[in-house]
Image (cartoon, helix red, strand yellow):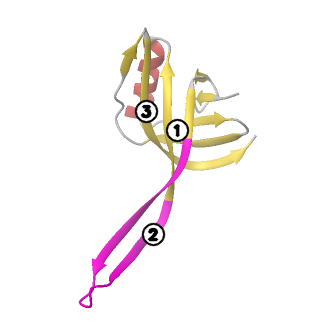
Amino acid sequence: MTGLYSATNDLITRYVNVVPKKDTIKVENRLLDGTFHVQTIGTSADLLDVKLQAVSEPVRARIDTAEATAEELRIVFGNMYWDGIIRAPLIWEKVAGVFNTSFEFLVLRTGTL
């Protein structure tokens, strides 16, 4: 079922939306003849752009704790799952009693259900 889960497979919130993307480190240099040389360093990391809702303060606090401790989480969307960690501090917005946030999720493993 779609949602954000803890490492012990406990549902934290089911209100989650994801967009997969890649994160690459590129070095761009302009050569003496005016052309460009682009170098990609290492392999690109798999990321998810995640938008989610926490319907209560305890759920919001649980997600904050997972981010602060770099706890491994699982995101399930459709028949896909991604295991990983929240990459950056969360900024929350409260609208009509529901907490909304968006963040990058660093993917460690992926698979199908």
The residue located at (38%, 15%) in the rendering is 94
Identified by mark 3, the residue type is Ser
Q: In this view, which residue lies farthest toward the top?
A: 97
In space, the residues marked 2 and 1 are separated at their CA atoms by 23 Å
Q: Quadrant of the C terminus?
A: top right
- Mark sitting earlier along the chain (1/3): 1
Location of residue 47 with respect to 26 vertically, above or below: above
Disc 3 designates what residue? Answer: 102
Q: Which residue is most to the left?
A: 32
Seen at 43% across and 33% down, the residue is: 102
> Is disc 3 placed on a helix, strand or loop?
strand
Location of residue 33 by image quarter: bottom left
* Identity of the residue furthest to the bottom in this view: 33
Q: Could you say which disc has been placed on residue 72 in the image?
A: 1
| Between 73 and 39, the one nearer to me in the picture | 39
Measuring 59% from the left and 33% from the top, which residue is drawn there?
Answer: 7
Task: Answer with left or right where residue 8 lies relative to residue 21.
Answer: right
Q: For mark 2, what is the residue?
A: 42
**Is 26 part of what is drawn in magenta?**
yes
**Quadrant placement of the N terminus:** top right
Mark closest to the chain's N terminus, 2 or 3? 2
Q: Position of residue 25 (x, y in %)?
A: 39, 64
Q: Are marks 2 and 3 in contact (CB under 8 Å)?
A: no
On screen, residue 38 above or below 93: below
The three-letter code of the residue at mark 1 reads Glu
Residue 57 spot, x, y in % from top left: 42, 12
Q: Which residues are magenta?
A: 19-44
